[in-house]
Amino acid sequence: MAIKLSFIQDASLGGDIEITVRAAEKNERVEKLLSALSGRSGQTAYGRLFAEKYNINASGIILIMRDGRYVTAKTVTGDYTIKDALTRVEESLDPAWFVRISQSEIINLRYLKNWDFVGGGIIQVKMEHGIVSYTSRRYAKQIREMLLKRRAKR
């Protein structure tokens, strides 16, 4: 059983790289390959699960927010309405990249531009595409610790 590699140029991807693995069956060898390619064993599974359930590419999501009775996903390509509870949406997202910042918002750390401490223990979060959000005090401590850890790794 050989591994064949091919390259397809697609300008619509921008700076992203999309990898598709095709095989006769999903076996241990395929799982190992997906794990090695993703850098995190669960990242591929989370993205696929989210796309199948909500028909939205999880890697393009900037922010997910509860908007009245529905949940809105703000993506690079536009806004999508999800008719599901925010907690159920959060379960199908990769916890390494998606972080809850309040009871009504989840952000994708890939699109985080900068963050700043503002008064009262609240953190202002600036995302790409001009989106500005604020953490609630309830989540501020754990978010601050997580952001400081990520900053130290750089």
Image: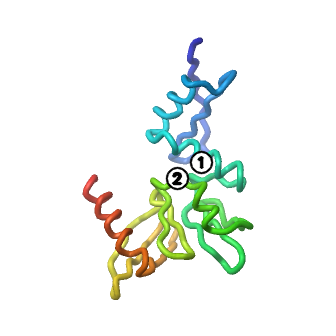
Colour treatment of the image: rainbow
Can you name the residue that lies furthest to the top here? Answer: 1
Q: Is residue 119 above or below residue 15?
A: below
Q: Is residue 19 left or right of residue 85?
A: left
Residue 118 image position (x, y, % from top left)? 34, 83
Residue 7 image position (x, y, % from top left)? 57, 28
Q: Which mark is residue 120?
A: none
Under circle 2, the secondary element is: loop
Residue 108 image position (x, y, % from top left)? 50, 61
Under circle 1, the secondary element is: helix
Q: Is residue 25 left or right of residue 63?
A: right
Residue linked to disc 1: 47
Residue 151 image position (x, y, % from top left)? 29, 59
Find residue 148 and report its image quarter: bottom left
Dividing the image into 4 quarters, which one contains the N terminus? top right
For the point 27% across and 53% down, which residue is it? Answer: 153
Q: Label 2 amino acid?
A: Asp
For the point 34% across and 83% down, which residue is it? Answer: 121
Residue linked to disc 2: 94
| Count of numbered badges drawn on the protein | 2
Can you name the residue that lies furthest to the right here? Answer: 83
**How dense is the environment of label 2, judged by Cα within 10 Å: few (below 14), some, or many (20 and up)?**
many
For marks 2 and 1, the one nearer the N-term is 1
Q: Is residue 8 above or below residue 151?
A: above
For the point 53% across and 33% down, which residue is it? Answer: 34
For the point 49% across and 68% down, which residue is it? Answer: 100
Q: CA distance from mark 2 to mark 1?
A: 7 Å
Q: Label 1 amino acid?
A: Gly
* C-beta proximity under 8 Å, tags 2 and 1: yes
Can you name the residue that lies furthest to the left here? Answer: 152
**How dense is the environment of label 1, judged by Cα within 10 Å: few (below 14), some, or many (20 and up)?**
some
